[in-house]
Image: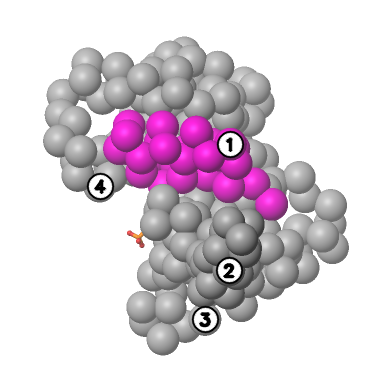
Amino acid sequence: MKFFIDTANLAQIKEAQDLGVLDGVTTNPSLMAKEGIKGEGNILKHYVDICNIVTGDVSAEVISTDFEGMVKEGEALADLHPQIVVKVPMIKDGVKAIKYFTEKGIRTNCTLVFSAGQALLAAKAGATYVSPFIGRLDDVSTDGLVLIEEIRTIYDNYGYQTQILAASVRHPMHIINCAKIGADVATCPLSAITALLKHPLTDSGLAQFLKDAGK
Ligand code: G3P
């Protein structure tokens, strides 16, 4: 399973890249705002800065909600850097835009996906990635992992090449369960990735080894 980091924070992206297990980055307008990135020029520069840190795909989201606006924005984003994947919301014009981008060879990430039907439409339109938000489903007492299982089954039934990118991942068990189900990618906060490192028996075992090595 690929690991993406879900942030626009350059220091966190560098830290994850330095760990040697990072396959890409996802951003969204909320994450960009959290870093105080404002104005078109600064936003575009920030995407390039991210691409220059990592070797994998970097999702950059369009703000427009109409077909023409999404196409204009998405083409400009795709022109920025070969690593850019255009992130498009799962709305009617978004599906049309994904189809358009697919035919032009521009890679896409269909975001804000909360149902298997939405994921099926994204795959039929040719999305490179589909982003089911599992944490936000959990927040409303619906098991986000069940959605990942449903999408895995549907995509496998028909051989869709769209990659399942589990998003709104909140903790290490989300990552582990996504890997068990067979999600292609999990995009996670740095804290969830580093939490995978931790086990008290590792800490106590290492302490004992170091103590014994000194004997
Ligand atoms: O990848 C989507 C993600 O940024 C949403 O996460 O925690 O705001 O639901 P969250």
Q: Is residue 11 visible?
A: yes
Write down the region rendered in magenta.
Answer: 1-27
Q: Earlier in the sequence, mark 2 or mark 4?
A: 4
What residue is pinned by disc 3? 143
Badge 1: residue crowd in 10 Å (few <14, some 14–19, many ≥20): few
Q: Tell me what residue is drawn at x 42 percent, y 65 percent.
A: 170
Mark 3 residue crowding within 10 angstroms, few (<14) / some (14–19) / many (20+): some
Say if residue 109 shows up in the picture.
no
Q: Cα distance, mark 2 to mark 1?
A: 27 Å
Badge 2 element: helix
Q: Earlier in the sequence, mark 2 or mark 1?
A: 1
**Could you tell me how far apart the alpha carbons at marks 1 and 3 are, in whole angstroms?**
31 Å
Is disc 1's CB within 8 Å of ligand 1? no
Query: How packed is label 4: few (under 14 Cα within 10 Å), some, or many (20 or more)?
Result: few
Quadrant in the rendering for residue 66: top left
Residue topped by disc 2? 208
Which element type, helix, strand or loop, lies under badge 4? helix
SS type, badge 1:
loop
Q: Which label sits on residue 53?
A: none
Viewer-side label of 2, 1 = 2
N-term-proximal mark, 2 vs 3: 3
Residue 115 at what x, y percent from top left? 54, 69
- Kindly identify the amino acid type of the residue bearing the numbered disc 4: Ser
Magenta-span inclusion, residue 151: no
Mark sitting on residue 30: 4
Which residue appears at 36% of the width and 20% of the height? Answer: 49
Residue type beneath disc 2: Gln
- Cβ of disc 4 within 8 Å of ligand 1? yes
Query: According to the image, label 1 marks what residue?
Result: 20
